[in-house]
Amino acid sequence: MRSRRAALGITLLVSALVTLPLAAPAGASTAPAPHAASVQQHKILKIGVTQEIDSLNPFISITRTGTDILRTAFDYLTVYSQKDQTPTKSLAESWETSDDKLTWTFHMRKGVKWSDGEPVTAKDPAFTFNKMLTDETAATANGSYTKQWESVEATDDNTLVIKTKVPQATMLALDIPIVPEHIWSKMSDIGAEPQFPMVGSGPYTVTEFKEAQFVKMKANKNYWRGAPKVDEVHFIYYRNADAAVTALQSGQVDLINRLTPTQFDALKGNPDIVTNNAQNRRFNEIVINPGAATSDGKAIGNGNPALKDVKLRQAIATAIDSKTLVDKVWGGYGEEGQGYIPPVFADYAWKPSGDEKRSFDIDKANQMLDDAGYKKGADGIRLDKTGKPLNLRLLAHAEANLDETGGPFIKGWLKDIGINVALQPRSDDQVNEDTTRGDFDIAFSGWNANPDPDYVLSLQTCGNRPNAQGQGATPDSFLCDKEYDDLYADQLQEFDPAKRADIVKKMQARLYDQATLVILGYDNALEAYRKDAFEGFPKQPADNGVIMNQQGYWGYLGATPKGAGPVPTFDENGMMTTSDADTTEAAADSGGNTGLILGIVGGVVVILLVGGLLFARGRRKTAEDRE
């Protein structure tokens, strides 16, 4: 799980904050970037980010920013299309499956090379997948995809054969970066941070990292889908969104996301800036520790044992008002919490109805606790079954809008039902460590869901609990429930889309009933970029989608500097084309997504850090900002 830092409190008005002088990241120039004049020469896309990177190891990284970078550095067998997020060809040019759907044969694209000039062959995905099958650490980020695999073999340089133990409906949606065997097979510790420059196969290559300053990426001018229009991409880290917005206003970065509503509204009137408001693929949640344990069932952590009672968890869920959070925290730029799968994925989204629906009701929550035997003490705080006061810790990410602004609301609501809550703002690192160890009672969290729901569904299974070292799998709420696990196995093997969707909705109903998590809502992706520096970016989905944090690399691959238009789109095979799609500033204000701050200055992607560390030497998983 993941983390962050600082004292919780109500956020100050951004309109005032964004006028303050910019606190530049170490090593960054304090002068505004000379956009239009220099973009014709060395083109650099500068992206401002406010999240620490957990790792740039593709076997380990799961956070929003880390995976965003890695998607541009490593290619996949298949990727989600720019147009509508359906699976399309990538390193695999074609494939077929056996009648029993237990054997999948992928035919590799010929002529693709790694950034060091070595050819990409079937041996590379074979190495990647076999490493995940045989090394628990290598399975940390994406091991749920390979748990039911029997074997992986490269029968020749162009043919990859995967045999599964059971039919697996996700075989064309494997969100696993393919690494070069000739590099990673020499690593003695598969969980270590990679060497720079990193050898990759994507549209950009990570060339340099300066801790607490930046990550730089250089464009792959020989990329098989077509060369990027920029020479570099720089990701620059800022401690908070206020500093990132100021950097955008002064021209020090070109693109940012994760704006607060006040910031977003203030930028709308800036003639040099285009804003993008899009439905997001992210859900935000409060996770409730039901009794953390390792994958083999050994209890870990110091969570309050009272939370093992599902009736207590259900009462807590009844006392949280999603509508207030959408209105007061997100300024109406979001949707109220319903099911586990975000509404953007309409085929799988689920809403509780009838008697199963929990509406916000303080009186009902109090009655539920009365009926469950949680009596109030003289001070109004309820007592658990052992007679101890119900005191809970709410772990939060410091300087995160939802956590800082929403935390006091949740504290107040739970006080109204006799539960005392202590807000605990922490750094990203500390939240990661505490949640992975199970050292929390309740905590802010959230994930970006994939178009195929399997990955986020797997996070709630017994098998996705970690080992004693906090590796080998990625948990969310530490749920371990046989009924849920059985449904998970059923959906994995169901190839009929409608039947599979029905099973996925049953899983969400079970999660809702068990209340190990409470969906707080789905905030929109609020992004902004400088139109004096960029014509625009391909969005995903193409109609009113996001620029940053895509399920792919289309926004960065097609980033178009001012005067270098038109902005490209990508066809059903993922090849670069041009069209009249809504990708330029004229259409940007109507849609957008969670993203990063981008700046283009010469074919390298750089991520800078302001006032904090960019890279974690271990695995930093930010509970509020996971992929």
Image (cartoon, rainbow, N blue to C red):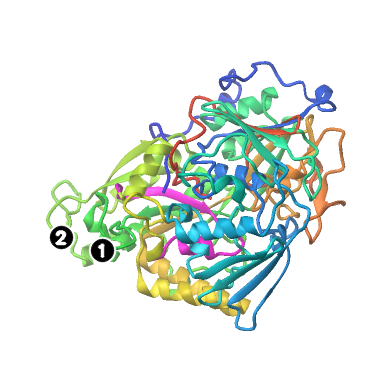
Compared across the picture, whether 568 is left or right of 44 comes to right
Q: Which residue is mark 2?
A: 385
Name the spot of residue 15 as percent of width and height, x first.
59, 28
Above-or-below relation of 441 to 47: below
- Badge 2: residue crowd in 10 Å (few <14, some 14–19, many ≥20): some
Q: Amino acid at mark 2?
A: Lys
Q: Is residue 449 magenta?
A: yes
Compared across the picture, whether 359 is left or right of 591 comes to left
Q: Is residue 10 magenta?
A: no
Q: Quadrant of residue 360?
A: bottom left
Residue closer to the observer: 87 or 193: 193
Who's the residue at 59% across and 29% down the image? 214
Above-or-below relation of 71 to 238: below
Q: Quadrant of residue 317?
A: bottom left
Name the spot of residue 413 as percent of width and height, x first.
34, 50
Who's the residue at 59% across and 72% down the image? 169
Q: Which residue is mark 1?
A: 309
Q: Which mark is residue 155?
A: none
Who's the residue at 36% across and 50% down the image? 470
Q: Quadrant of residue 358?
A: bottom left
| Contact check, label 2 and label 1, Cβ < 8 Å | yes
Q: Which residues are magenta?
A: 439-461
- Badge 1: residue crowd in 10 Å (few <14, some 14–19, many ≥20): some
Q: Is residue 162 visible?
A: yes
